[in-house]
Image: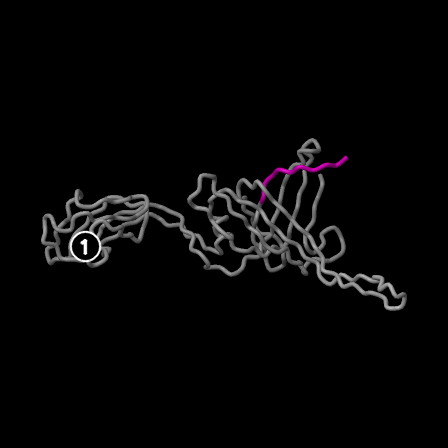
Amino acid sequence: MAYFSGQGRVYIGARDAAGNPQSLSYVGNVPELKVSLSVETLEHQESTSGQRLTDLQLIKTKKGEFACTLEELVPINLELALYGTTTQVTSGTVTGEPLPNPVTPGNLNLLAQQNVSTVVVKDSSATPLTLPPAQYAVNEKHGSIVINDATTGGPYTEPFVVDYAYGAAQRTAMFTQPLPERWVRFEGLNTADANREVVIDLYRVAINPANELSVITDELLKFELSGQVLADTLKPAAGDLGQFGRIVLL
């Protein structure tokens, strides 16, 4: 018997111009991975017997669908789910970043950078006055500031400006990339067959953006990648590769 219950690692990466996989990235824990195959057929009914019997079936199209559930919030997953581009931010300093004019006491004001430190708030007078730290609150990791008191110690000339240092971060901007076509590989174990090893390759998967990211939830964040398995016409239809993918039992 050859029952199957799979576990393993999923890797996703780009293809070169010849259809070969580039360096593939591990996407972390994947609790569910599905590959669905289907065909669309054309049927012909004869018109001589009085029973309209189906006497021919032709395959019109062959389709494959891919879906996997991701759990880890890492740049490679965000880039795929958001059609995004990740930028590595290096540490630096900012001088004289203006706040909204006028500031509204108690409201949140966003700084251009995150992971900030050594924050100093000044006004815009000819001889700038420094706002006492007791009059504002900074969320250093998130890069935001609330001015609670904009009068004590003044009068101040707005806009207030902020000097600060900031640390390293990773930013993934949404919808900055075209539809990604990726090579998907599963390197797994058949836990129903003494952990017999298996490899599944999908050569060309057009990945859809994630339907949703459940950011506030009592459960661990999970988001689904889905897409269509496209034919890779750079590969021969015959032989052990095929044009859509392959399963290798080891």
Q: Looking at the picture, does residue 142 appear above or below residue 100? A: above
Percent across and percent down for residue 194 are 69, 31
Residue 30 image-quadrant placement: top right
Query: Which residue sits furthest top?
Result: 194
188 inside magenta stretch: no
Q: How are the residues colored? A: one colour
Left or right of residue 4: residue 80? left
Percent across and percent down for residue 118 are 23, 44
Percent across and percent down for residue 141 are 32, 43
Left or right of residue 208: residue 126? left
Q: Which residues are magenta?
A: 1-10
> At 23% across and 44% down in the image, what residue appears?
137
> At 44% across and 42% down in the image, what residue appears?
217
Q: Looking at the picture, does residue 30 appear above or below residue 54? A: above
Question: SS for tag 1?
Answer: loop
| Closer-to-camera residue (43/12) | 43
Return the residue at label 1.
160
Left or right of residue 44: residue 77? left
Residue 135 image-quadrant placement: top left
Specify the quadrant that holds the C terminus.
top right
> At 65% across and 38% down in the image, what residue appears?
6
| Closer-to-camera residue (57/110) | 57
6 inside magenta stretch: yes
> At 29% across and 46% down in the image, what residue appears?
116
Percent across and percent down for residue 228 are 62, 56
Q: Amino acid at mark 1?
A: Phe
Left or right of residue 80: residue 6? right
Judge the density around disc 1: few (<14), some (14-19), many (≥20) Cα neighbours within 10 Å. many
